[in-house]
Amino acid sequence: MDSNNSVLHMPVLMEEVTQFAQPQSGEIWVDGTAGGGGHTADILQVVQPHGHVIAIDRDPAACLKLQKRFDQQAVIVVNDSYHHLPLHLDRIAESIGVAKPLLVDGILLDLGLSSDQLADRERGFSFQSDGPLDLRYNPNEGESAAELLRYIREEDLANIIYQFGEERFSRRIARRIVEQRKIEPIETAKQLADLIHRSVPGRIHGRVDSATRTFQALRIAVNRELEIVEKALRELPACLKPGGRFLVISFHSLEDRLVKHIFREHEALEVLTKKPIEASDDEERRNPRSRSAKLRVSKRK
């Protein structure tokens, strides 16, 4: 990562988030996937001077940037996964001088991959990176994608690629990976992307690179993303005040289905968006990654 504090990431659905979140002065909000702090800054502008934003991110590098960007007490930066929010609330209540138990006015989760992470050549999120094939949001937790690929059974790998990546060539890709690791280990993102490009017909499928779904699947697996999303959707409503808003932006169908079903089923939530909110044509032109973004909103009963 560059040593400077520049932020590349352009958050999606900013206007729509503000419209549905309806933050008010003095409120306490959680940005559970703070990244570069775009949504955090937007909410902070409304809730300060007496309100606070709890900015959470699994990525230590992102948290360092957040601390530099928001060098003020109104933003509490937490380096952890958003599903651990309940573990931090008592400490945060003490630090900002409010009564326990602390209930927050709103929670926002933007489940997309940050452009800052894509730009970090040491993380392996970019297909063209010659750096390590890591794919972890926190490089200090769990095992990297390269480590996983050294030992995982071909059938299990094919299932991960199919289930988490919805990749129809999953068995062929898994077989080629297992064949390749007998010759030499797959250590970099570029090695894996090149192997996938040689394994499936046509480098581009529709509008996406043919390696996209496999990288997505491995990223989801090493970060336990769907497991964490499901746990958070079921448990975080208990952290909200009555009437508190819960907003989730997802970028692929697996996550969106989870959000849709749990929002509908959860006894403590009332769904505010019958259909997902999507980016405007203007935003899609300005920020192509917004094309796949879907925002769903509920509130605590």
Image (cartoon, grey):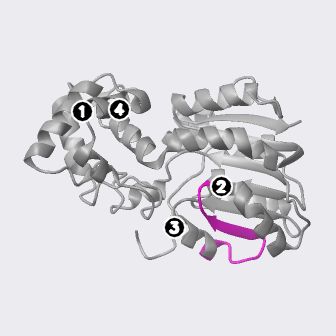
| Residue assigned mark 1 | 154
Q: What label sits on residue 19 in the rendered view?
A: none
- Residue occupying image coordinates x 79% and y 40%: 20
Looking at the rendered image, the disc whose residue lies closer to the viewer, 1 or 3, is: 1
Q: Earlier in the sequence, mark 4 or mark 2?
A: 2
Mark 1–mark 4 distance (CA, rounded to whole Å): 11 Å
- Residue occupying image coordinates x 47% and y 56%: 137
Q: Earlier in the sequence, mark 2 or mark 1?
A: 2
Q: Earlier in the sequence, mark 1 or mark 3?
A: 3
Residue 70 on the magenta segment: yes
Most foreground residue, 248 or 178: 178
Q: Earlier in the sequence, mark 3 or mark 4?
A: 3
Give the quarter of the figure containing the N terminus: bottom left
Q: Quadrant of residue 16?
A: top right
| Residue assigned mark 3 | 60
- Residue bounds of the magenta highlight: 68-81
Mark 3–mark 4 distance (CA, rounded to whole Å): 27 Å
Q: Residues within 10 Å of mark 4 (few under 14, many from 20)?
A: many
| Residue assigned mark 4 | 161
Q: Quadrant of residue 52?
A: bottom right
| Residue assigned mark 2 | 84
**Image check: 204 left or right of 32?**
left
